[in-house]
Image (spheres, rainbow, N blue to C red):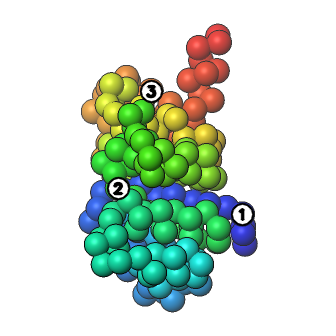
Amino acid sequence: MFPKCRPVVIAPSNLLLNWEAEFQKWAMDIPFHNLNSKNFFLKEDEGTVGVFHCLSGAAKKNLHLIWMVKLKSWAKSKSVLGINYDLFRILIGEDVEGYNKELREILLKFPSLLVLEEGHTARNEHSLVWKALKKVETEKRILLSGTPFQNNIKELYNTLCVVSPKFAADLEQK
């Protein structure tokens, strides 16, 4: 329906496995690239995977290369990327070099939709996860959570800032 949409699901690892299972269960034509899994979905970009398979055995175990294959495949075609909060935080970090720098750029610039499963995870403005999510350039974000807020207006405000980056900017201007 939206061929240029590049959704990213950020969730705890166990929930990413659920997302992956649902994509397989419903025989979706849309690949789900789980960055936290070393396995391929078997719908990655053929050219990118071809280069990967030409590498020696040791290089194939390099997580950075696996991540790059999945990210490049996701960026090139209609697909969904899944990543857990910790790996997202690490790959978005300021001190990344080499492969990670390119991974960081892709994760910051390419997503057109963020789906934050267990979105209450990013309710503390001092957390590295909150800071990483604020850097992603897309304005389209969905927060999923079954955890209620405990009468803490600051946590609610911080969550709204992650879900709607313009929200904080608009408030600061007033």
| Residue drawn at x 30%, y 48% as measured from the top left | 86
Q: Position of residue 70 (x, y in %)?
A: 48, 68
Q: Which residue is mark 3?
A: 157
73 or 119: nearer the viewer: 73
Please tell me how crowded label 3 is: few (under 14), some (14-19), or many (20+) other residues with Cα within 10 Å. some
For the residue carrying disc 2, how many other residues have a C-alpha within 10 Å: few (<14), some (14-19), or many (20+)? many
- Looking at the picture, how far across and down is residue 17, in whole percent? 32, 72
* Residue 80 seen in the figure: yes
* Image quarter in which the C terminus is found: top right
Residue 130: percent from the left, percent from the top? 39, 34
Query: Quick check: 134 left or right of 78?
Result: left
Kindly identify the amino acid type of the residue bearing the numbered disc 2: Asn
| Front-most of residues 9 and 57 | 57
Q: Is residue 45 above or below residue 164?
A: below
Helix, strand or loop for disc 2: loop
Q: Which mark is residue 4?
A: 1
Query: Label 1, label 2: how many angstroms apart (C-alpha)?
Result: 23 Å
Give yes or no for contact between labels 1 and 3 (Cβ–Cβ under 8 Å).
no
Identity of the residue drawn at 51% across and 76% down: 51
